[in-house]
Image (cartoon, coloured by chain):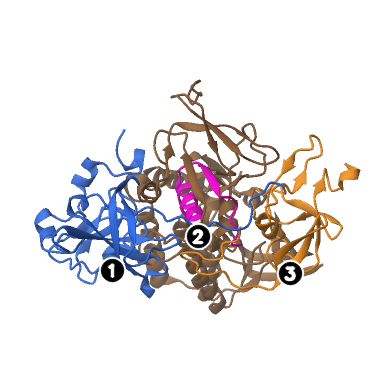
Chain colours: A blue, B orange, C brown
Amino acid sequence: MTGIAYTGVPSAEELRACPGIPTPERRKKGRVAVIECVQEIPCNPCAAACPFHAISIPGEITALPRLDGELCTGCGRCVALCPGLAITLVDETYGEEEGAVDFPYEFLPLPAEGDTVDAVGRDGRTLCAARVVSVRRPEANDGTRVIRIAVPKRFLDDVKSIRRLARKEEEDAWTTK
Amino acid sequence: MRITDHPILGPAEAGREITIFYNGAPVPAVEGEPIAAALMNAGVRSFRRTAKRDEPRGIFCAIGRCTDCMMIVNGKPNVRTCITGAADGMRVETQYGYGGRKEQA
Amino acid sequence: MKKLRTEVAVVGGGPAGLSAAAEAARAGAKVLLIDENKRLGGQLVKQIHKFFGSEAHHAGVRGYQIARRLLRDVEDAGVTVASNALAYGLFPEKELGVVWDGKHCQVSAERIVLAAGAKENYLAFPGSTLPGVMGAGAAQTMANINRVLPGRRIVMLGSGNVGLIVSYQLMQAGADVVAVVEGADHIGGYGVHAAKLRRAGVPFYLSHTVKRASGDGALARVEIVQVGKNWQSIPGTELTLEADTLCLAAGLNPMTELAWMAGCAFLYLPAFGGHVPAHDAKMETTVPGVYVAGDITGVEEASTAMEEGRMAGLSAAESLGYGAGAALDAERAAIQRRLDDLRAGERGAIRRESKARQTAAAADQRQGGGAT
């Protein structure tokens, strides 16, 4: 069975029906939010967070957030505020060969600017190598970092995060007493 | 293992470092933290042994409800170590059965 | 023995109790808030994720910060707080037996709000008592409050929101989650929580359960097995995972002891975690003057608990003559709307229906001539 309730990964059909995904035309114009919120749950901080009123939750609070790509400036206010961490930004215009993805990240250790890391997709599988462009932690994010990575353009639709970095080996032994 | 840094909560608050004694052996602790936290950090997993089958029990609820973490603390049996704060020099012993030491089990 | 008198006694200092106490005191009532822990806030204090809901539900704010706000509200409203105070009994004439700082005392109140919350369900299987097998809430307390990692390699049994959120938080604390195991054929919690774990590489084993946990003196291995339609194990599908910690996230059940003692009418609502007291829209049970709020009325979310707490606090105060008229009605209508929001949509259907049965049961009881 496919779909987020069976796999934790939104299916192609769910993504096609999702009103938070910008159109291909809008994506060509530059950085824009991609809201992969495909399940009706009572939640709306994304709509309140958008200073440009580009996100709306029509009717009941459980309705899926709708993105108006023309109003979205790609500012990223919604990225760290979404409690479900379901919003990323894509920028197809970032470079000749590369596009950029901004995503929320809440693990330690953090990568540093310029590092090469593994970019992963919705199912956690490594898709390609990525270059870390920036790691930001605005006060308003309350701990959630927003990382921007550059990846080859053909992976832009599917890159959602990076592989968790290994912790430094701790010195204390984990023993059974 | 202590969680010294955390992506959301930030660095752990520095507390006063003290020593408690687990079955006679010194174990580092932070003053006021639950005894169970200091023991768990030190790798202790079995806190008491049951009366009938002498089976080990460890942390189960961590909020003072289940009694699996009861130990003998400063000579007093049946102390719930998950909600009892550590103090310098505290003597903590594995509890056997309903509150005894090994030789009484 | 110490004897205390108050207008409103609130039992439980979690999201529901704090909200009830603040509202009742703000309305003008003299309020005593009783909690068994040294620190108020209930389970909110270990919730480090951002909450869902709307702005009115503090959406986008992390749970432990919501607790801080509620504590400030309680303080500002002039509530008297009894922490490290265990309410062990509720006797006729609304008398509470309380052990406060180790000393016995008796609290008589004109109105009582029960907001005792819920406790984790236990699961029995071979090896389930081994050290290293623990409630998901226990692991969360250790990591987020005590700042000690309960283990390094975690198996989570249960994919409801608690299982998903705690798995993610243990990874934030530095552990690895080697599997989320779920007996049903679908993930129980929100898809977005599951998606976070999948992106971080956590495998899900649906239609699986734990066959046995084993290890020499402490957990070392978890054997899981696939289950068929009638929940029977399918031989030959066993899989052994190396893990030092197995967290049980098999749901919660309401802590209703005091409501039983009070003589409230109950009904059985599986979606709410078991037997729950019937109550009306104002959160009053079938025992006049005894109100309930939060998980004791049926296990839902902290956001729901806060709204129910507000409703109970306002109503208890009103019945004592504090606050009345159009302003109060409007406020209660707003709270009810927000509660309806939290039970909206397909995922809220079963809770909507259960809540309707719960309020209908209270009405039936009253028509039929009172409590059981």
Return the residue found at the far left: A25
Q: Nearer the viewer, residue B9 or C361?
A: B9
Return the residue found at the far right: B104
Badges 2 and 1: C-beta atoms under 8 Å apart? no
Q: Which mark is residue B18?
A: 3
| Residue with the mark numbered 1 | A77
Please provide the residue range marked out in magenta.
C146-171
Q: Residue C170: within the magenta?
A: yes
| Mark 2: few/some/many CA within 10 Å (<14, 14-19, 20+) | many
The amino acid pointed to by label 3 is: Ile
Please give the name of the residue rendered at 20% of the width and 70% of the height, measured from the top-left corner.
Answer: A52
Q: Residue C318: within the magenta?
A: no
Image quadrant occupied by the C terminus of chain C: top right
Q: Secondary structure beneath disc 2?
A: loop
| Mark 3: few/some/many CA within 10 Å (<14, 14-19, 20+) | some
Quadrant hosting residue A27: bottom left
Which chain does the numbered disc 2 sit on?
C
Report, in whole angstroms, how far the alpha carbon at label 2 lies from the one at label 1.
23 Å
* Discs 2, 1: same chain: no
Q: Nearer the viewer, residue A163 or B62?
A: A163
Which chain does the numbered disc 1 sit on?
A
Q: Which mark is residue C47?
A: 2
| Position of residue B76 in the picture relative to residue C11 (left or right) | right
Report, in whole angstroms, how far the alpha carbon at label 3 lies from the one at label 1.
44 Å
Q: Secondary structure beneath disc 1?
A: helix
| Position of residue A94 in the picture relative to residue C344 (left or right) | left
| Position of residue C208 in the picture relative to residue A135 (left or right) | right
Q: Secondary structure beneath disc 3?
A: strand
| Mark 1: few/some/many CA within 10 Å (<14, 14-19, 20+) | some
